[in-house]
Image (cartoon, grey):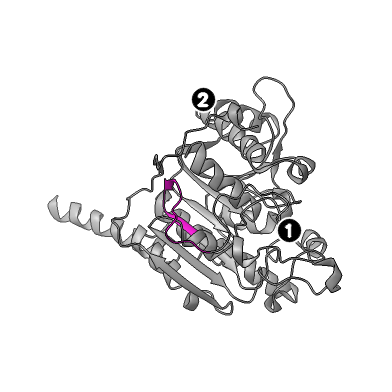
């Protein structure tokens, strides 16, 4: 029976290696993902304080969760192609739908309060209330949300909101955070002065939280559209409040990947991207449908590689292999062009972690954010 046992173990290991060798985050995953399920804010007990759009497989399972905080003037459903790509590999995305008008007029603290209220609602009873609301909205009945495996994904001013929450309020048990072109403040004009960090790059100033972080930036996000000079039209992600502005002040371990030939909003679905293209510069590689599809899949692959390193999804490769994939992005993402910086001299937390440090900053409760 000993040889038989060894044979079974060998077959099991071989099968695992075979599964991982077929893992391709650039390709659509094996799971079917229907259109997002909208869990509405009804004001009734048991409903979320703001709408949540759920991008999830239509297959039974207990899935890790990415909480997605979108940028300015668009909804999570505006990037359905990108988020569905992530979900097709077995990672549920919960898109937090802060009303667009509120985002346009409220300050940084109030916006953070909105998102923190949703996170508090999700975490209060291990998502039991949210799961019930999801199923009532037509969601898959045998799907559950594993909030012990939680990460943040944020874009543009959603990055400021998320960093504000991590810095001042709570980690909410997150294992890591991914920021796509994060922008400090409310707007690129600087009308909202509640910056988390001084403008510019200040490596001597660090944030008040520690967690594995990936910063994914686009090479043309800092370019402004060519409107008449008297309009003083800004870039959507100016250099002094995006990119290295954040990366320099984040704690290790941290990674920065620059997809050099794309712009700030090139990952949005077609109609939304065309509308946003009147505000933000596009990159030359996004000039046609095929180029934009490559960008969405490239972003999705980076999100999956980093998420999988901390979520420990059984069908994904081991942590070190996933992080190596991320660090080798310049070669992996062809025909996209990319560069990568990583700083991870500290021992890596095996399953990710997030904690806040005092640094003289007070802990704020959600009710104090007004």
Q: Which residue is mark 1?
A: 189
Nearer-the-camera pick, 197 or 335: 197
- Residue at x-position 73% and y-position 48%: 75
Residue 31 in the image, given as x and y percentages of width and height: 57, 53
Residue 203 magenta: yes
The prevailing secondary structure element of the residues shown in magenta is loop
Please tell me how crowded label 1 is: few (under 14), some (14-19), or many (20+) other residues with Cα within 10 Å: some
Residue 249 in the image, given as x and y percentages of width and height: 46, 57
- Residue at x-position 77% and y-position 43%: 105
Q: Nearer the viewer, mark 1 or mark 2?
A: 1
Residue 312 in the image, given as x and y percentages of width and height: 39, 50
Place residue 189 in its image quadrant.
Answer: bottom right
Magenta region, residue range: 201-214
Distance CA(mark 1)–CA(mark 2): 40 Å
Give the mark, 1 or 2, whose residue is nearer the N terminus. Answer: 2
Residue 221 in the image, given as x and y percentages of width and height: 66, 68
Nearer-the-camera pick, 68 or 241: 241
Is residue 123 something one can see in this rendering? yes
Q: Which residue is mark 2?
A: 125
- Residue at x-position 61% and y-position 34%: 118
Is residue 63 something one can see in this rendering? no
């Amino acid at each position: 029976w000993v040889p038989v046992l060894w044979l079974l173990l060998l077959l099991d290991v071989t099968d695992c290696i075979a599964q991982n060798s077929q893992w391709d985050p650039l390709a659509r995953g094996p799971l079917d993902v229907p259109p997002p399920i909208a869990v509405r804010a009804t004001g009734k007990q048991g409903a979320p304080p703001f709408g949540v759009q759920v991008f999830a497989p239509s297959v039974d399972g207990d899935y890790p969760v990415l909480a997605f905080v979108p940028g300015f003037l668009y909804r999570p459903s505006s990037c359905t192609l990108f988020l569905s790509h992530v979900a097709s590999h077995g990672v549920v995305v919960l898109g937090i739908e802060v009303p667009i008008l509120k985002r346009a007029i409220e300050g940084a603290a109030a916006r953070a309060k909105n998102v923190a209220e949703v996170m508090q609602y999700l975490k209060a009873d291990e998502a039991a209330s949210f799961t019930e609301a999801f199923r009532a909205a037509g969601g898959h009945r045998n799907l559950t949300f594993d909030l012990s495996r939680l990460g943040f994904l944020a874009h543009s001013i959603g990055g400021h909101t998320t960093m504000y929450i991590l810095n001042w309020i709570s980690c909410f048990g997150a294992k890591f955070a991914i920021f796509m072109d994060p922008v400090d403040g409310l707007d690129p004009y600087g009308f909202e002065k509640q910056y988390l960090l001084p403008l510019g790059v200040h490596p001597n100033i660090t944030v008040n939280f520690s967690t594995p972080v990936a910063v994914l930036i686009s090479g043309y996000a800092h370019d402004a559209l060519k409107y008449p000079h008297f309009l003083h039209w800004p870039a959507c992600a100016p250099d002094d409040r995006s990119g290295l502005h954040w990366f320099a002040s984040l704690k290790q371990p941290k990674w920065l990947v620059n997809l050099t030939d794309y712009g700030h909003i090139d990952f949005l679905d077609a109609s939304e991207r065309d509308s946003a293209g009147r505000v933000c510069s596009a990159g030359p590689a996004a000039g046609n449908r095929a180029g934009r599809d490559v960008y969405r899949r490239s972003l999705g692959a980076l999100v999956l590689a980093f998420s999988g390193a901390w979520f420990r999804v059984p069908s994904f490769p081991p942590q070190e292999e996933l992080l190596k994939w991320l660090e080798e992005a310049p070669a992996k993402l062809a025909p996209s062009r990319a560069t990568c910086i990583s700083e991870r001299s500290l021992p890596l937390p095996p399953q990710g972690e997030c904690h806040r440090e005092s640094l003289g900053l007070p802990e704020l409760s959600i009710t104090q954010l007004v």
